[in-house]
Image: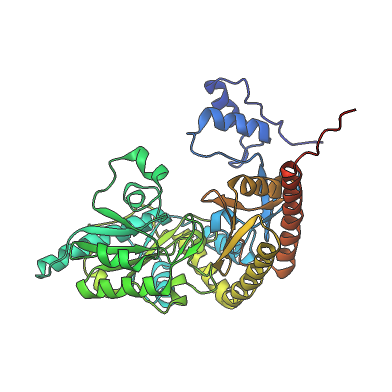
């Protein structure tokens, strides 16, 4: 006997009928919908914020996702850097099951639970910081960092120091989508629709030391840096730029803020990308892989910065709940137990070398950049990059995405193997060769006409 529910058809349903169909078809919170029905329902019901690809995933295991037809996809995106331990990892499953058995998924931050201090200790150890604020996302962590910078400057002014409220951010930066975070995000398409955003932010050309020195003065309370820009195209900050930023902040008491939302928690082969530079910021922000796919963020700071926050100045309803903390502890423990930082560094280096070999052999590739398993392959053409991304997904069943129009971004789970890197390179090379052959045929001049 087939006990499966019939697939839902939303294409001609009005909203009331849509809502009743969803309720009737629920089993344990899940619905049985195919891709066409899902697309139609989302078009009717969701705010239009995402341009989704036509793939419906129903399960995951290891470094693979599976669509509704059971087709496996090698996932080199991992939820945009979120699923560092891949899918269905036993360490995460055990942590979730154990916490569920207590019946305690949420407690107010007005009370204690037994994971918060343990997780905070782990985070201070791996980041070199002293204090932690737990929240729900990367953009919330960055909001907390910006508020801390302003509050710290106010504290310094009360103590008699001269320091203002302005913030320096970098061109091509991306720090999130809430109003403070988007104010420090450089791309116009993220900021302009919401003007006026938070005032007091200026942008400095990336890695331009002279411009940084010229822009910095006593009005500045913070310098914002992604040690490895993600959305901006996988660009690492230079050693000199990072060192000068640190020295400028030291001179006035301004805070150096390092956004490690995408590059942190082991993504580059170290817990934080700033550790490759031997430079310690005053504040860092973490999120994405921190809780294995559950929503979580953290703002970590040193004791000097932490002086500025007192009870009631900032907070969160859901941040640092028992379930996400239990999973975050499991993620950190598994990274340490399995020596995944070393694995990320080793396989990431191999992956980068293989991508660089593609760049050396194919004119379509401009440059390869990145650290560990946060890599970008910059193409000379946005059209070629778009075609390559789409065909990798739909023909080769390998997931990656495109940022800054021309850059193919690779953020695979930390568990990826050399063999899976080789599979990726072989697929990409075959497609690049096809694209280049097609371009050469189009560019080849037609022969002279023969007249009889």
The residue closer to the viewer here, 310 or 176, is 176
Residue visible at 16% across and 62% down in the picture: 154
The percent position of residue 438, horizontal first and vertical second, equals 75, 45
The percent position of residue 425, horizontal first and vertical second, equals 72, 61
Q: Residue furthest bottom?
A: 278
Q: How many labels, in total?
A: 0
Q: Is residue 130 visible?
A: no
The residue closer to the viewer here, 189 or 241, is 241
Q: Is residue 344 left or right of residue 209?
A: right
Above or below, 286 relative to 40:
below
Above or below, 115 relative to 390:
below
Residue visible at 70% across and 46% down in the picture: 391
Residue visible at 40% across and 67% down in the picture: 116
- Identify the image quadrant of residue 217: bottom left
Q: Is residue 173 visible?
A: yes
Which quadrant, please, contains the N terminus? top right
Q: Is residue 168 left or right of residue 124?
A: left
Q: Residue furthest front?
A: 452
The residue closer to the viewer here, 289 or 230, is 230
Which quadrant, please, contains the C terminus? top right
The colour scheme applied to this rendered structure is rainbow
- Identify the image quadrant of residue 188: top left
The residue closer to the viewer here, 115 or 310, is 310
Q: Is residue 174 left or right of residue 29?
A: left
The percent position of residue 141, horizontal first and vertical second, equals 37, 58
The percent position of residue 290, horizontal first and vertical second, equals 49, 63
């Amino acid at each position: 006997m087939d006990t499966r529910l019939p697939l839902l058809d939303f294409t001609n349903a009005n909203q009331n009928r849509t809502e009743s169909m969803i309720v009737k078809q629920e089993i344990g919170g899940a619905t049985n919908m195919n891709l066409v029905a899902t697309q139609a329902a989302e078009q009717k019901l969701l705010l239009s914020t995402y341009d989704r690809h036509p793939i419906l995933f129903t399960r995951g295991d290891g470094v693979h996702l599976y669509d509704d037809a059971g087709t496996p996809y090698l996932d080199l995106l991992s939820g945009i850097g979120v699923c560092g331990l891949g899918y269905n990892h036993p360490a995460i499953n055990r942590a979730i099951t154990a916490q569920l058995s207590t019946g305690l998924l949420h407690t107010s931050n007005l009370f204690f639970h037994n994971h918060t201090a343990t997780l905070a200790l782990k985070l201070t150890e791996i980041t070199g910081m002293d204090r932690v604020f737990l929240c729900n996302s990367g953009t919330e962590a960055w909001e907390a960092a910006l508020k801390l910078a302003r509050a710290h400057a106010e504290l310094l002014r009360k103590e008699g120091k001269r320091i203002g409220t302005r913030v320096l951010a970098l061109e091509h930066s991306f720090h999130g989508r809430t109003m403070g975070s988007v104010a420090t995000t450089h791309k116009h398409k993220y900021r302009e629709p919401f003007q006026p955003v938070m005032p007091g932010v200026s942008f400095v050309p990336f890695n331009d030391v002279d411009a940084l020195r010229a822009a910095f003065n006593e009005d500045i309370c913070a310098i914002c840096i992604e040690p490895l820009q993600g959305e901006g195209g996988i660009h690492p900050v230079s050693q000199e730029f990072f060192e000068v930023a640190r020295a400028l902040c030291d001179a006035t008491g301004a805070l150096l803020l390092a956004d490690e939302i995408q590059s942190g928690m082991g993504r580059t082969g170290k817990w934080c990308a700033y550790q490759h530079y031997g430079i310690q910021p005053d504040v860092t922000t973490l999120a994405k892989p921190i809780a294995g796919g559950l929503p979580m963020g953290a703002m970590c700071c040193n004791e000097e910065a932490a002086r500025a926050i007192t009870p009631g100045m900032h907070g969160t309803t859901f941040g640092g709940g028992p379930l996400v903390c239990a999973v975050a502890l499991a993620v950190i423990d598994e990274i340490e137990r399995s020596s995944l930082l070393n694995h990320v560094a080793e396989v990431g280096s191999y992956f980068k070398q293989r991508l660089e070999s593609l760049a050396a052999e194919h004119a379509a590739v401009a440059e390869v950049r990145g650290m560990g398993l946060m890599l970008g392959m910059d193409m000379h053409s946005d059209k070629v990059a778009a075609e390559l991304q789409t065909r990798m997904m739909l023909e080769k069943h390998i997931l990656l995405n495109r940022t800054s129009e021309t850059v193919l971004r690779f953020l695979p789970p930390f568990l990826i193997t050399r063999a899976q890197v080789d599979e990726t390179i072989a697929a990409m090379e075959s497609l690049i060769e096809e694209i280049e052959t097609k371009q050469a045929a189009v560019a080849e001049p037609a022969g002279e006409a023969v007249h009889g």
